[in-house]
Image (tube, coloured by chain):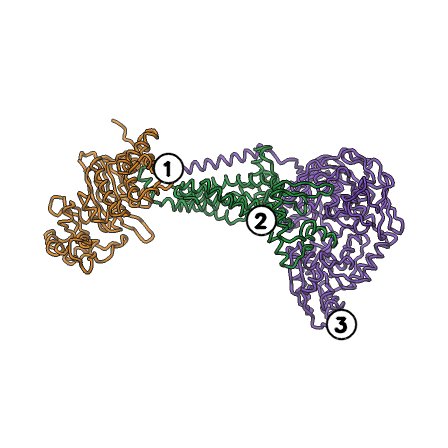
Chain colours: A purple, B orange, C green
Amino acid sequence: MKRRRTVGAVAAAVALVLGLAACSGSSSGSTSGSSGSGSKPVFNAAVGKVYNPSTKTGGTLRFANSGDWDSLDPADTYYGYSWNFIRLYGRSLVMFASAPGAAGAKLVPDLATSLGKSSDGAKTWTYTLRKGVKFEDGTVVTSKDVKYAVERSLDKSVFTQGPTYFNDFLDLQGYTSPYKDKTKDKLGLKAIETPDDQTIIFHLKKPFSGFDYFAQLPATIPVPEAKDTGTKYKDHVISTGPYMFQQNNLGKNFTLVRNPNWDQATDPNRHPLPDKITVQLNVNADDIDNRLLAGDLDVSIEGTGVGPAAQGRVLADPALKAQSDSAVTTRLWFTSINGQVAPLDNIHCRKAVEYAADKVSYQQAYGGPIGGDIASNLQPPVIPGAKSFNLYPTPGNKGDITKAKAELAQCGQPNGFSTSISYRAERPKEKAAAESLQQSLAKAGIKLTIKSYPLADYTKLYAGKPDYAKANNLGLIVYGWGADWPDGFGFLSQITDSRVIRAQGGNTNLTVRDPAVDALIDKAMTGPDLASRQADWVDVDKKVMDDAYDLPGVWAKGLLFRPKNLTNVFVTDGFSMYDYLALGVQK
Amino acid sequence: MTEVQPETARTSQTGIVRPFLDVRDLKIQFPTDDGLVKSVDGLSFSLERGKTLGIVGESGSGKSVSSLGIMGLHQGTSAQISGEIWLDGDELVSATPDFVRRLRGRKMAMIFQDPLSSMHPYYKVGAQIVEAYRLYNDVSKKVARQHAIDLLGRVGIPEPASRVDAYPHQFSGGMRQRAMIAMALACDPELLIADEPTTALDVTVQAEILDLIRDLQREFGSAVIMITHDLGVIAELADDVLVMYAGKAVEHASCRDVFRNPEHPYTWGLLSSMPRLDRDRQDRLVPVTGTPPSLIALPPGCSFNPRCPYAALTDGKSLTEVPPLLPTDGTAKHSVACHLPPARRRAIWSEEVAPKL
Amino acid sequence: MFSYIVRRLIAAVGLLLAVSLVTFLIFFLVPRLGGATADDLASRYAGKTANAAQTHALAKQLGFTDPVYVQYGRFVKGIVVGADYSTGPTTVHCSAPCLGYSYLTQNPVLPDLLNRMPVTFSLAIGAAVIWVLFGVATGVLSALRRGSVFDRAAMGVALAGVSLPIFFTGLLSLTLFSYKLHWFPAGSTYTPITQNPLQWAYDLILPWITLAFLYAAGYARLTRAGMLETMGEDYVRTARAKGLPERTVIVKHALRSTLTPILTIFGLDIGALLGGAVLTESAFSLQGLGAYAIQAIGSNDLPKLLGVTLVVAFFVIMANLVVDILYAVVDPRVRLG
């Protein structure tokens, strides 16, 4: 009797559940179904060209993030995907063009009418603003709003996460923050002049030819002083772009809708297609991949590609592979060779490491060819002006033990030596890379002890702290670096300039200490034209490789997946992921 | 002619007047991994209303199992039951379980050895009595509660009106057993089975409980089966005594006869092993030699033969034949299951065993 | 009973303080024992390219340069009277009980906790109802039909239930029921019950079932074992001897006793879950306290961490208290205090 009752209850429960499922109908707003208006999915269809071009507006574009933004506030954000996305709700002075491939790595004027005009030996930069650009509330944008935005980005006690380029390059003369500014309109920073509403002039303390790259930083997105609420501004950022915030639940999700006060006439760069954009935060990473593949999600916003589980599925299924793109990024996985740890203070011992390394095995550690291309120098080829070269060629890239031993003989260690190699504990690929080096270097007699350190403090407390690295014999340090933006300065400056090395740790340049390199960097920063500067950066790359301070591993690639209902999809070299400004959805 | 109710037991249709409780060749066996345990192996006895039958025996003799069998409490277990149990004209072994269930509490009730574990610790004593009462009596809660209070008073619990709301653990041992008796009597059962009701109690309390049972029997006229291993209790209460060994009855006589003229060697052994005050202290007590038999592998023939000092005097019969329970003097009032000839038994009793007691 | 409750509540406050102190100490002392300085700690929250001066200023701002007892005192003071925080242009007052501001998002922690509680509560309580019903029912049936096909099958499924990790069953059920069959919504959908109760339940069905599966399995095994033991008790035999129908014997006499230890375990389980069903929330991307805790740990964000830890501790302590009281109510033999 009891059993019958229980079975009956279970049946009732199941019926209820199915009934609810039927009543609540299908999922909201999904646009699954047939393929695009004629575009046939093909592997890498969005690399270097536009896949499924469209001008059809409407629909909701759905993003998901497996983590959280560092901040939606333009003064406080550093993530690449954030800089890509922020163009939807903010207009900086200049921006990376919304165009496929190499064209996407070029700067075009956004708020400004043209790229910056330099004077005073590249120490002064002037921009003219377009007329008629408005905030979402209808107020007209003036140059003073841009100045105020840059001023507040200087305050690192309020905005701790953002880049410090303006702090480092502007002639601050002691200015700290508009929040401590005593002038009436809080525009006391003399390094920025705003003689009229359309003109803005920047004064640097040292010349820098690549200032346009600073002008594309989100920090130049105008912020109305009257509505600046400091740390609370990210709750509702006042938009100058085609979309504005409708709803923002920090840490959970937010929604953007069309900004009625954005005027297409003032904006040749953008053709916003979706009516609505939703972003979900802190979503389980595997769930994101599953949803993408099922068509229940449009974009995985971090732009680093699908995870290992989904990657296997995508590559194995021809239909799924046709919907994916292998995007080359501006990220290099490499191993620093620490010249402060004997016997690597001798250049020949370092060169021995360069020759002994089996690059194919190193590439395997990062997932083989789909994970990235074998790197022979530092600058990823996708950076404009980068040239590939190989100072330490080995047969089949598998290492050359004979040459390695010859170098060892020259540095007085004919039988090899011992040192330690460090990696970030939470990165299994880095562990595999360390193990690969351990094996390949052992053939030359170089014995490596593998040490792991927590990711969060790797550069702050351990490998990135010079004294710690020295004391713990960290001769080799497995690391990775992605450019802040795709140019020589954006990639190389942080990892090769010895003057940015801080004793207290938190370094990204772990090992390069060569005044000759520093001099080349200075030259590259102040070169008269783009071509000469690009050549200078190649020289920097060559010198560092000649010094053998870094062992390049792979130039990373991400496997991006595009669901069938996305339109206007292309990989932009500006951010090495899909361009979020151009995307649309079809119903 | 009325339809035969589907849940009626087989009634005696031949007009035989049976005793109130008539157990015929009851066998209760349990299949186990080690073999078939023959807990009750052909038990027969009868009991009239108003009379008390004492069942005495060691642990494993089958006294509790047979009583549980009468109550039908082996239902749902793996027990295999055969034979007949006639209670007031209804045969219980062939009856449906539901029929027997409806007799429990109403026609027959049982009280158990440990009143603390036998009453539900979460429910008040009054509630447990009320539950038993309202099962067979369609009355309001108030009336039932009053009945419970009356019962508690009747069994000698002081201040029953307040004690009715107490929990079992709040009673002393003796009071708790009285409460259990009250619960068993809630519906005026005609057969009361008491399974070692005083074993867990102090000696002084024991006497009170036995008195109570006797009083209640006189008042309600119920038949009482008193199961015990304590001969003193038997002497006090029983009209008739059934001595059980290895699942069978070995001697069935009036109480007087069991103590004055026992005829089974096992009974002799029981009597001899009792410590007594009215004789000189001996160096050693005299137990029944040997250990109780395995109920799976009973000794062939008379189950007692391994321990019987007189087995040799049976011409080998005790090794091969199971002695039937036969009247020893033709009156069926005193039956003995033994191969020794009656005259021989009486002689051994009067000459060898009795003087030593 | 009343004085017992008051004593336990006072002890609870002391226990919460102790929990907060230990969390605090772990956060601050352990890295220092490893040689980290205040600036090193602050550099976790500074951006990629902060220089020494900026990091040091941040260390002072976050209070890391003060001695540990001063920092802890500040925290306790915040709980008692509140604290003031700068947003840049203005200063806001965070009223008591102020659980601090996140080092990374610079948002107050308490509102975050409060608006995540309904999610976790919905998840925990809904799943609890399901697992108690199914688990206990299955356990009782298994015990009554011991050795039968049902019993063996049920215990086999139960073994799977307690062995399979939630993030496996969760992701599996999402893939099958959400993305393939489209019967249920995708992860990270949540509708508050005040907005639309039917939608709220529909959104939570998969997480409920996933979470309940794990616990129901355990409770089925527990109930089965408890029932088997109880059914052999003397008072059950007495109940049958009274002539009670078998159903009454099972439910009123046996099950009642079996449920008491299950009640204790249930209280502890639900207490811990109310503080955050970490794995289920992660698998289904539900923004409850459990997901919050993971984010706090991953980003080394102490105020968030302290907030969540205190919430969890609070619920566990309260659950213990309620269970202890309920036990005394249910079992008259138990004396409190």
Q: Nearest the camera: C47 or B350?
A: C47
Q: State the residue position of label 1.
A: C248
Gap between marks 3 and 1 measured at Cα: 93 Å
Q: Nearest the camera: A227 or C155?
A: A227
- Which three-letter amino acid code belongs to the residue tagged 2? Ser
- Chain of residue at mark 3: A
Q: Nearest the camera: B343 or B319?
A: B343
Residue furthest toward the top?
B1
Q: Residue at x 19, y 57 (%)?
A: B286
Q: Please tell me how crowded label 2 is: few (under 14), some (14-19), or many (20+) other residues with Cα within 10 Å.
A: many
- Which three-letter amino acid code belongs to the residue tagged 3? Gln
Label 3 sits on a secondary structure element that is helix
Q: Position of residue B298 (x, y in %)?
A: 25, 54
Choose top left, top right, bottom left or bottom right for residue A148: top right
Q: From this viewpoint, is residue A230 visible?
A: yes
Gap between marks 2 and 1 measured at Cα: 49 Å
Question: Is residue C162 shown left or right of residue A559?
Answer: left
Q: Residue at x 20, y 46 (%)?
A: B234
- Chain of residue at mark 1: C
Q: Position of residue A506 (x, y in %)?
A: 71, 56
Choose top left, top right, bottom left or bottom right for residue B85: top left
- Which three-letter amino acid code belongs to the residue tagged 1? Thr
Residue C20's label in the rendered image is: 2
Gap between marks 2 and 3 measured at Cα: 59 Å
Question: Is residue A201 shown left or right of residue A296?
Answer: right
